[in-house]
């Protein structure tokens, strides 16, 4: 039990050395008693999927065999961010960065690096090897430009060890709040910092808290929205997996500010690792008296529970989420009354996103001015993005607001693989839009993205290259919203289906020019008439691709061609007879027996060229990779 | 998502029923308990047959329409049994852009069942799933708990062979 600040700071001081040991500033003097090396292994969902837990077990076994178990600490952490290179293993104090490790590599690392003292060069992330010199992870392009606030502990601490969190000044903000600040002080600090909701809408967090605090005393609730439904977004999951105590601390602070004693975290059931770690963290916080009654010896009490979502995208909408916690179909309800007035079980409720909460303890400890110093005029602080799609460094990044899209994609993200060109970036998931190459230098913040017809959303950032068909992409998102529309209001339920029908018609080559006007008209009706955020934003992918890639729609309609070669009805596979060497590999791959030999022998070739019978071809594309060497098969 | 009612006969055991009753008793009087109970019931039976929904409705004293309404609203709740090996292809954006659709085509042709169906011998079932968050490994599929990432269609046969 931690009864007061002195007991908390005693734990912090005991563990601070351990945390500093993992601060990989080159040349910094660090020590952790007898322990000479820390081995950090990523235990996020991505790396766990590629067996990081088994790698840890193997590593511990090898360390024991080598007899150095008293000198090495092995830690399973949250996500390091660079998921493309997983599973990742980092060795401190050097900050050596091993990527794509397999179980069999564990022994080699123990023998050569931990015992022998020489990093295993062949297993290192190639960007960290510069001749004889080995860089630490902080010196790589991926990490250098990032500014980690919400993710500060992810990949640094053991999320299941409450003392390690305390070692990073954890729970100190809660202690300060309940012993030194009034609820109004807390709300003013949050207001002053200018932080806006990280879940997508960008509503000022402090104002939400102020409204809820202004309600008459009585039962109130603090809710965390962890129903991260945007496909391709996983920032909330990573925070829950990597730093669950930050969320608990922040929710308790929010409870103190508005006068609530109960919190609910609504998490997707699809995130089992996140749910388990959060539950373990809640149990640990209760055991230490950081949740429950008389927190830090005051009469403030706060406790919390996890509620699992069950796979409904609309539950990311705040009123739908509250309905779902109440045990009903997750349908939204009209606002006003806003949740701050009438929320969960009819009581005043604040609801914030995981990433928003993760910023709160830092704002309390370092002050509003510190937070305000980062970002743009109207968007303060940092934002976490999940980079995905056609980008080299898929993973999680945190950047100050105002960083340009080009910097994120080209520098941090390492650019587009395979020498392809950047075509567009999609932000905001099914509610957002596309930013085309002509707007590559846009500074990312809430208002700039809305001005581009997109939105921040929760932070998914999917990169597309020239092989992506924008009409097909709009159709993909519409299929998603049609599936996920809860059906309560007609504009969304019926309107999105009609939009999808028109898009399908266009991708099948049956579109007419007047369809484009119909799309726009209908899209605007849906936007203005739908009940909740899902319907109001569902047409955005259509509108933004229409605005930025109208020529692609026209190519589908007028020329009956899909320029990216995606829409199956609008292209055929062909073989360039003069390039074809006649090896016949493609015919072996073809599942439809559509490829046969011609009589034509190209100049200088020995065998007759192959051809594709368009009437038999199912356009599966299986032949393409077989011709990598000669590149004779193309889409036309 | 549209949900088909199963045609497979219900064969719950007394032991499962006892577990279910224990679960309902644990949540008695709790606000908003229906979702956790349905989640628990699905854990016990593997799916939510109408017989189980009826039992929950009677025990909790709520209309069956409400139970059924919640069960059909959320995509996680399934009304059909899964195969011994449940194959799920992630069709989230990151996977889709990287060719997850082709994986689905290949699975459908190799297994001889469509998305959302179960094979006659109940060995395999095939589903599309929402983003599972392993976007760094895109495109991915899962077989029960096992995750396979960075896939191309020609790798599918090798994966299925492991379970045959």
Image: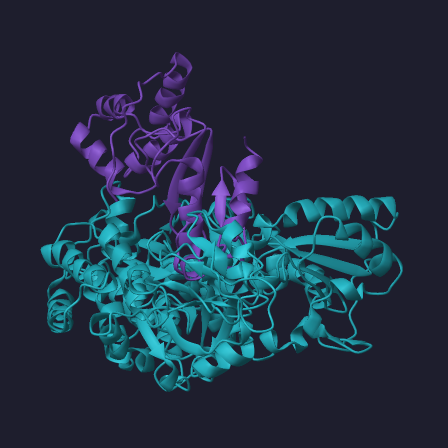
Chain colours: A cyan, B purple
Q: Residue furthest top?
A: B14
| Location of residue A382 in the rendering, given as x and y in whole percent from the top left corner | 46, 75
**Quarter of image, res B22:** top left
In this view of the protein, can residue B125 be seen by the observer?
yes
Q: Is residue A532 above or below residue A274?
A: below
In this view of the protein, can residue A220 be seen by the observer?
no
Identify the image quadrant of the C terminus of chain A.
bottom left
| Location of residue A632 in the rendering, given as x and y in whole percent from the top left corner | 50, 68
For the residue pair A185 and B163, the one nearer the viewer reads as: B163
For the residue pair A54 and A170, the one nearer the viewer reads as: A54
Q: Is residue B124 above or below residue A9?
A: above
Residue sitting at x 25%, y 51%: A483
Q: Is residue A209 left or right of residue A582?
A: left
Q: What is the count of numbered marks?
A: 0
**Quarter of image, res A573:** bottom left
For the residue pair A113 and A33, the one nearer the viewer reads as: A113
């Amino acid at each position: 039990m931690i009864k007061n600040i002195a007991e908390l700071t005693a734990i912090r001081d005991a563990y601070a050395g351990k945390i500093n040991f993992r601060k990989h500033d080159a040349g910094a003097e660090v020590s952790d008693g007898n322990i000479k090396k820390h081995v950090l292994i990523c235990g996020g969902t991505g790396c766990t999927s590629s067996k990081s837990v088994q790698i840890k077990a193997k590593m511990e076994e090898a360390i024991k065999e080598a007899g150095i178990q008293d000198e090495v600490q092995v830690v399973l952490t949250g996500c390091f961010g660079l998921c493309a290179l997983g599973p990742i293993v980092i060795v401190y104090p050097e900050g050596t960065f091993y990527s794509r490790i397999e179980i069999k590599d564990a022994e080699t690392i123990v023998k050569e690096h931990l015992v022998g003292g020489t990093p295993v060069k062949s297993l290192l992330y190639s960007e960290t090897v510069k001749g004889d010199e080995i860089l630490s992870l902080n010196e790589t392009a991926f990490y250098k430009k990032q500014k980690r606030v919400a993710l500060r502990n992810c990949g640094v601490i053991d999320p299941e060890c409450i003392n390690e969190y305390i070692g990073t000044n954890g729970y100190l903000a809660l202690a300060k709040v309940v012993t030194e600040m009034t609820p109004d002080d807390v709300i003013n600090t949050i207001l002053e910092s200018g932080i806006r909701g990280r879940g997508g809408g960008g509503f000022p967090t402090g104002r939400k808290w102020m409204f809820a605090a202004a309600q008459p005393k009585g039962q109130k609730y603090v809710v965390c929205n962890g129903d991260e439904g945007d496909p391709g977004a996983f920032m909330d999951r990573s925070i829950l997996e990597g730093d669950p105590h930050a969320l608990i601390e922040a929710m308790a602070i929010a409870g103190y500010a508005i006068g609530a004693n109960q919190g609910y975290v609504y998490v997707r059931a699809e995130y089992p690792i996140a749910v388990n770690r959060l539950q373990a963290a809640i149990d640990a916080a209760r055991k230490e008296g950081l949740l429950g009654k008389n927190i830090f010896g005051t009469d403030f009490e706060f406790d919390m529970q996890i509620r699992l979502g069950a796979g409904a995208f609309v539950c990311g909408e705040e009123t739908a989420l509250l309905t779902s916690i109440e045990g009903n179909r997750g349908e939204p309800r009209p606002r006003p009354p806003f949740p701050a007035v009438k929320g969960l079980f009819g009581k005043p409720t604040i609801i914030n996103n995981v990433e928003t909460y993760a910023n709160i303890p830092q704002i309390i400890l370092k002050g509003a001015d510190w937070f305000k110093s980062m970002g743009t005029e109207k968007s303060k602080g940092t934002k976490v993005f999940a980079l995905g799609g056609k980008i080299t460094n898929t993973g999680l990044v945190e950047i100050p607001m105002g960083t340009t899209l080009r910097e994120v994609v080209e520098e941090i993200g390492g650019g587009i693989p395979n020498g392809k060109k950047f075509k567009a970036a999609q932000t905001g998931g099914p509610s957002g839009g596309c930013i085309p190459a002509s707007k590559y230098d846009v500074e990312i913040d809430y208002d700039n993205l809305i001005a581009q017809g997109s939105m921040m959303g929760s932070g998914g950032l999917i990169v597309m290259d020239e092989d992506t068909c924008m009409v097909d992409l709009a159709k993909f998102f519409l299929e998603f919203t049609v599936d996920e529309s809860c059906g309560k209001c007609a504009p969304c339920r019926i309107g999105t289906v009609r939009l999808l029908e028109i898009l399908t018609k266009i991708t099948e080559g049956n579109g007419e020019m007047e369809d484009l006007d119909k799309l726009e008209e209908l899209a605007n009706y849906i936007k203005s008439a739908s009940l909740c955020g899902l319907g109001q934003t569902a047409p955005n992918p259509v509108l933004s691709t229409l605005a930025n890639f109208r020529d692609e729609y026209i190519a589908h309609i007028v020329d009956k061609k899909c320029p990216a070669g995606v829409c199956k009805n609008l292209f055929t596979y062909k073989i360039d007879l003069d390039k074809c060497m006649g090896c016949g590999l493609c015919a072996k791959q073809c599942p439809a027996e559509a490829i046969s030999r011609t009589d034509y022998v190209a100049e200088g070739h020995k065998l007759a060229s192959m051809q594709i019978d368009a009437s038999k071809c199912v356009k599966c594309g299986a032949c393409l990779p077989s011709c990598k060497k000669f590149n004779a098969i193309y889409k036309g | 998502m549209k949900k088909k009612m199963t045609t497979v006969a219900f064969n719950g055991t007394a032991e499962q029923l006892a577990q279910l009753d224990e679960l309902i008793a644990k949540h008695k009087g709790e606000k908003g308990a229906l979702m956790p109970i349905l989640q628990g019931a699905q854990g016990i039976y593997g799916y939510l047959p109408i017989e189980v929904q009826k039992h929950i409705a009677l025990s909790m004293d709520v209309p069956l329409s409400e139970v059924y309404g919640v069960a059909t609203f959320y995509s996680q709740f399934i009304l059909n049994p899964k195969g011994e090996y449940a194959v799920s292809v992630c069709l989230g954006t990151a996977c889709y852009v990287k060719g997850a659709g082709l994986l689905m085509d290949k699975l459908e042709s190799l297994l001889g069942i469509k998305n959302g169906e179960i094979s006659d011998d109940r060995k395999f079932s095939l589903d599309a799933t929402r983003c599972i968050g392993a976007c760094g490994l895109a495109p991915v599929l899962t077989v029960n708990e096992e995750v396979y990432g960075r896939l191309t269609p020609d790798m599918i046969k090798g994966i299925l062979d492991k379970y045959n």
